[in-house]
Amino acid sequence: MRQKEVMGQSMRTTKSARPGSVVYVPMDKSEFRSIIFSEKKKNKIKKIVILIILMIFVIGCCMYAGISYYYSYHFFYGTTINGIDSSNKTAYEVEQEIAGKKDNYTIQVRARMQDPQAITGKDIDYKYVSSGAVLQLLKTQKSWEWIGGLFETKNYMVQEEASFSREKLEEQVNSLNCAKKENQIAPENAYVSFVNSEFTIVPEMEGNELNTREAYQMICRAIDNDAAEVDLESDPKAYKKADVTKESSELQNMVNTYKNLTKTNITYTFGDETVTLDGNTIKNWLQFDEKGQLLQNDEAFRQHVVDYVAQLAADHDTVGTERQFQATSGRTVYVYGSAYGWKIDQDKEVAQLMQEIQSGTQTTREPVYSMRANAHGINDLGDTYIEVDLTEQYMWYYQNGNIIFQSEIVSGLPSDPDRKTPPGIFTLNSKSSPSVLRGEMTANGTYSYEQPVTYWMPFNGGIGFHDADWQPYFGGDRYLTGGSHGCINLPPENAGQLYSLIQYDVPIICFY
């Protein structure tokens, strides 16, 4: 400072550009030592700071390395595995916690129409089995990135492997209430019923009869997936199903068939008399069980039809019945007829009626006949017939109530049962002109007799009308001694006339 002041003064006193003489000012040694000491102190502090920094750095590196090493065996902070907080835990510790959860494993089994039941892990020796997935997850963790773990969370899901006894599970399934026979209701098929005056399909009932094998497989899969609950009803295969459902085309066809059945109306005509078969009667032929299910029994139903037709025949057939007949002579006679009259062809009528019932036919008709008569009612002979009075030995041919032909006759020999003309009601079988009448064939191959005739009109097997020019006379008592072999002998001219008049459907009444 002094130097500066001196120099300042000097400069103020002179204006010369030449430098002046240098004046040395003595320095205080104490000041010099303080400067040196200050510099050394600064350097020392600097070194200490650097050393501290280095030490901190080294310690930090060591700590970082140590922590990194720690996290090579532990999961980062903020790590969750399968819902377990795995922060700072080893793979073994995590797996122990997973295993701990398995120790308390229970699965609820829900079943149709039953309360839920539980199967515990202890019941089936349920145990955790390490698959190495947790350890493998730890190995993929980069331990030196542990700092990042402090600021983020990571959630992982790994497959939890477990083992259990299949045999013990099967035992547990079989012991469930839903698997016991006494608690099971078998499914019921849909069926057709007659409700509110119409046929309808009653839907099937599902029941709760268990397919035990399928239920076992279903529970087994649920346990494999570590499920806490399984609902057997969620699998359509777990329960036995009805064989027939309401969607069955067969049931629908049944409904349509039986609906037609109730529409059926068949009116039979027997002359002026009618008999009606309708759906109400037919419905009574059906069979129903105690719950109203229609029992499809085609054979039983057909038997009802057969019985109905048989009753029609019993009420209206006249073949094989005895008739009261007013003879021309004024006598009232009773004549049995097995070859004339009304006779329903029951087999054909049953077949036609079955078809009409199935199609719901509404019609008016006659039954199917195998034999027909001229009229209905008590006297089915009508007013066109041939009357042969075997006692009077006389015959008449009535047409529409009028006599169009009459003649004396000679009938069979009454004293010989093999030659006596049998009574009855018949119709013409055939007629031929000429013809040869033959008796029985003998042992040597010849006939007992052979008789040529001009007109032959059989009506009862080998018995018929024919000309007999060998008879000396007709009528009266000729038949008692000169009777035929059963035929009705006529004078040749009368036989020719009858041959030209006789019709196939005209009843021939023979009586004594």
Image (tube, helix red, strand yellow):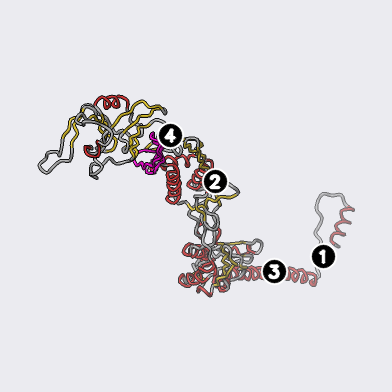
- Quadrant that contains the C terminus: top left
**Could you tell me residue 473's position as x and y percent?**
23, 31
- Marks 2 and 3 sit apart, C-alpha to C-alpha, by 120 Å
- How many numbered badges does the structure rendering display? 4
Which of the marked residues, 3 or 4, is nearer the chain's N terminus?
3
Identify the residue shown where x is 15% and y is 37%: 449
Expressed as whole percent of the image width and height from the top left, the position of residue 24 reads 80, 63
Residue located beneath label 4 in the image: 375
Q: Label 2, secondary structure: give it.
A: helix
Q: Is residue 117 left or right of residue 26?
A: left
Res 49 label: 3
Task: Specify the amino acid type for callout 4.
Answer: Ala
Q: Magenta span covers which residues?
A: 320-346
Q: Is residue 253 magenta?
A: no
- The mark that comes first in sequence, 2 or 4, is 2
Q: Nearer the viewer, residue 130 or 181?
A: 181
In the rendered view, tell whether residue 355 sits above or below residue 398.
below
Q: In front of the other: label 2 or label 4?
A: 4
Q: Amino acid at mark 2?
A: Asn
Q: Position of residue 279 (x, y in %)?
A: 53, 44
The quadrant of the image that shows the N terminus is bottom right
Q: Amino acid at mark 3?
A: Val
- Type of amino acid at the residue the image marks with label 1: Val
Q: Which residue is mark 2?
A: 280
Quadrant housing residue 320: top left
Q: Is residue 82 above or below residue 474?
A: below
Secondary structure at numbered mark 3: helix
Which residue is at a point 59% across and 47% down the rendered structure image?
A: 197
- Identify the mark at residue 25; answer none if there is no mark: 1
